[in-house]
Every structure is written in structure tokens, then in C-alpha cells.
Amino acid sequence: MQCRQGTRGSTTIGSALCIAIALSLGICDRIWGGVAWFEPPSNVVAEVNPELYKYEIQRIGIIGFINNSGTPDAGIRLASFFYTELESHRRYEVTPPLLLDEETELAFTRTAQAAPEEERSGRLRQFVREWLGRIWPVNAEETPAGPAPVPPLPEARTQGQRSLDAVLTGVITRYDDRQGTALAVDHPASVAYEAYLISARDGEILWRARFDETQKPLFDNLLLAGRFFKGGGVWQTNDTLARIGLERVVKTFPGIAAQPWP
């Protein structure tokens, strides 16, 4: 597998063929014997709220991610991947990505774009609180008269009035597709995003994760062979890179047992 630099007419030898040749010569056995104690980079940094035990999470709503990548529809595509991956674990009841009206979606996007990166999570948290509060306002009879602190966030409800315990959303900063073909590229696929699980009860961020990966040539790091073959043994598209990486992201998700990185 070759990452082309310069002319597009460069001859490319398929990576699968290279691996087959290496195996036939017994090269890979010696290489893997020397690096078996290492693990490939996860490209994931995640954090779970230490007070997560105070929250009961059964139903999660997903909102299309804010798309700052410039790739059309990346926000809803990534949200759909999260839905499929979380649903496959059967740990939570997950709603398909919730559709926002045009005005709310624009406000949602500006929330992240206008804020410095270090303020992003706080602004998203506040946006989700206000959005859910507008949809399901607190009953006026339950609100005490006179000045009072901001009331707790009302229970969020999906269509059919089933309560949500948390909302999953995030921000995509890069979603570049490969430039080239499956066997030879000028630029490989590259994906980066932040994901947040936000309590529907009080707006607390219960989990956050950052994913950042650009596909590398296989022989730059043979520890990545598992991901290489999972992606079809070729240069991956941005969607494939995101889906394979999402398996590692979700393994850090609350309530889903961690597994060794593939």
C-alpha cells in the first residue's frame, strides 16, 4: 500500500500482496515475536465523570454532531454511526439521531464555532439544557415565586413521551476523505472529533472522548495490521476510518466493558 507523493502515475503494489509475500518468507513471524508486548495507538482520549454513579442511565438520545469539517452531512453520518455501534452492545435504549429544526441547528453550530476550544464543552452543556428546557418547560405551578436559582433541567422526552436520561452529541473538526483510490492515495482519510454524553437531568457532562486518526501506510506500523484488514486491506474512506475508530471510542463509554485495542 503506497501513499503517493508527486505524480499520480506511480505504480502501486497492493498491501495484501506485500503481506502475503512477507508471510511466505517467514518475516512477519519474526517481526511479531519482537513486538508482541506492544499495542497499537488507540487514537482515543476519554474521561468519565467521577460522579457517574449518581446518575441512572437507561435511555440516550443522539443529536447530529456539529460539523466544522467542511464535509457535507458529516455530523449526521457520525451520529448515525454512534447509534449503530451503541445499539449493537444492547446496553442502553438509544434513539436514532434527533433532527433539529433549521434555526436550532444553526444556533447549535454557532455555539461551538463561536467559543474557544477550552470553552466548548461548557457551551454545549448549556445549549443542551436550554434546548431541552424550551421543549419541555418546567411547570409554572412548580416554580417558586420571586427570584430563584435556575431550575433543574426537566426530564427530556422523545416522541411518544419516553424519558431520556442523557443526550449524546459532539463536534467534528476534521472528516477528510482519501484523495486517490483504494490502492494508492495522495492524501489518506483523516478524522477528528469530540463526543459528549450530557445528563438530561442537570446538564452535567458524564463522559467525553476525543478521537483523532489519520490512516498510515501499513508498514509504518505493523501493529496496525488488525485495523488494516478490518478496513478491507486498502486505503480507507473517511466513513470506514470513523466506523472502525468508533469501536475503540465506544469501549470507553460508561457501562460498556473495555476490551484490548484492536
Image (cartoon, rainbow, N blue to C red):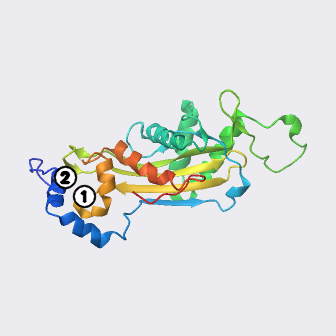
> In the picture, residue 35 is in which quadrant?
bottom left
Q: Is residue 147 above or below residue 33?
A: above
Instruction: First in sequence, mark 2 or 1: give its number.
Output: 2
Question: In what element is the residue under mark 2?
Answer: helix
Query: Can you see residue 257?
Result: yes
Question: In what element is the residue under mark 1?
Answer: helix
Q: Is residue 57 above or below residue 35?
A: above
- Give the residue at x 25% y 48%: 233
Where is residue 175 shown, x and y percent of the image?
Answer: 38, 47
Q: CA distance from mark 2 to mark 1?
A: 8 Å
Q: Is residue 221 above or below residue 251?
A: below
- Give the residue at x 44% y 46%: 68
Judging by the rendered image, the residue that carries numbered circle 1 is 218
> In the picture, residue 91 is in which quadrant?
top right
Where is residue 234 shown, x and y percent of the image?
Answer: 24, 47
Are there few (<14), some (14-19), or many (20+) residues within 10 Å of tag 1?
A: many
Quadrant location of the C terminus in the rendered image: bottom left
Drawn side of residue 164 relative to residue 40, left or right: right
Q: Nearer the viewer, residue 143 or 253?
A: 253
Q: Which amino acid does the dot numbered 2 rest on? A: Ser
Q: Is residue 28 above or below residue 234?
A: below
Are there few (<14), some (14-19), or many (20+) residues within 10 Å of tag 2?
A: many
- Give the residue at x 54% y 53%: 115
Q: Which amino acid does the dot numbered 1 rest on? A: Leu
Where is residue 51 shown, x and y percent of the image?
Answer: 69, 60
Q: Which mark is residue 201?
A: none
Where is residue 27 shown, x and y percent of the image?
Answer: 18, 65
Judging by the rendered image, the residue that carries numbered circle 2 is 15
- Give the residue at x 55% y 45%: 169
Q: Mark 2 touching mark 1, by CB under 8 A?
A: yes
Q: Nearer the viewer, residue 250 or 212?
A: 250
